[in-house]
């Protein structure tokens, strides 16, 4: 499970990354706000974001506010900050942070808060049968799907018109864009990986149907 860490202090970043990796998490570290924005745009979305407030190129809470207004509005966010006054904590939570931890902090406590927040975030928000879409997150039969940006785009396109046959070139244009330097085989490859993830989540299902010479459809 991947965690994005936005922290400009190398010593603190190393401490946090070590504590999380020791518990089995994959950690991606960025020191600049612009780098974190670029990473989040590129996808796939991390499972959780840990961010500092005072950064060399801006304010961490600006990113938090942006996330809450966009497709990653449900991304869990923990703020790490040297600002420990009640007003600072309240502001962070009001701007969209799910948790706020003041520096200096215990790495063990941080890991515990990460685990607790991930448990809440991964709880299905709707009945467990079938597909459930919540922003950039999709569940199948109650299981949260870990999809890449392109796999998510394909699935959402198929879900938007279930049982319709979507031609490969139409899927290519919709997900990759009309200027994409890709072909039908690219679509086939990503459909294959998407199917594998759907089977992992619901072994009894095979909702994506292949129509030879035509394209793909999704049976809800």
Image (cartoon, rainbow, N blue to C red):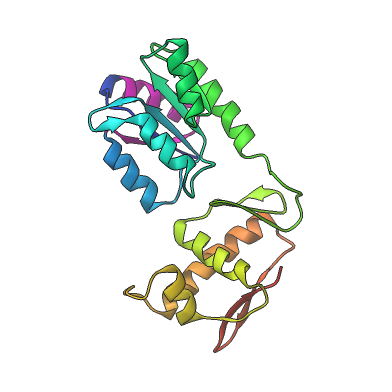
Residue drawn at point x = 46 percent, y = 22 percent: 91
Determine if the magenta segment contains residue 16: yes
Kindly indicate the quadrant of the structure image that contains residue 63. top left
Q: From the viewer's side, name the closer residue of 148 and 165.
A: 165
- Residue 122, compared with residue 186, is above or below; it is above
Image check: 91 left or right of 120?
left
Q: From the viewer's side, name the closer residue of 42 and 194.
A: 42
Kindly indicate the quadrant of the structure image that contains residue 33. top left
Q: The magenta stretch spans which residues?
A: 12-31
Residue drawn at point x = 33 percent, y = 40 percent: 36
Residue drawn at point x = 47 percent, y = 27 percent: 78
Residue 220's spot in the image, x, y percent?
Answer: 71, 68
Determine if the magenta segment contains residue 160: no
Residue 193's spot in the image, x, y percent?
Answer: 52, 64
Image check: 155 left or right of 140?
left
Residue 181's spot in the image, x, y percent?
Answer: 31, 74
- Residue 84, compared with residue 189, is above or below; it is above
- Residue 175, compared with residue 212, is above or below; it is above
Residue 166's spot in the image, x, y percent?
Answer: 56, 79
């Amino acid at each position: 499970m991947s965690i994005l860490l936005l922290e400009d202090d190398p010593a603190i970043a190393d401490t946090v990354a070590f504590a999380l990796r020791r518990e089995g998490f994959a950690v991606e570290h960025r020191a600049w706000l612009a780098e974190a924005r670029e990473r989040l745009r590129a996808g796939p979305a991390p499972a959780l974001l840990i961010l500092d407030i005072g950064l060399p190129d801006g304010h961490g809470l600006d990113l938090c506010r942006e996330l809450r207004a966009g497709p990653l509005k449900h991304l869990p966010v923990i703020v790490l900050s040297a600002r420990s006054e009640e007003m600072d904590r309240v502001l962070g939570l009001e701007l969209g942070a799910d948790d706020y931890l003041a520096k200096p902090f215990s790495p063990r406590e941080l890991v515990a808060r990460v685990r607790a927040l991930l448990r809440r975030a991964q709880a299905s928000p709707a009945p467990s049968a079938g597909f459930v879409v919540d922003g950039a997150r999709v569940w199948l039969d109650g299981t949260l799907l870990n999809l890449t940006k392109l796999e998510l785009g394909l699935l959402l396109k198929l879900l938007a018109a279930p049982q319709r046959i979507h031609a490969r070139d139409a899927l290519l244009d919709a997900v990759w864009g009309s200027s994409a330097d890709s072909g039908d085989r690219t679509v086939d490859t990503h459909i294959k990986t998407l199917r594998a993830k759907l089977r992992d989540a619901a072994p009894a299902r095979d909702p994506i149907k292949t129509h030879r010479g035509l394209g793909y459809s999704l049976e809800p």
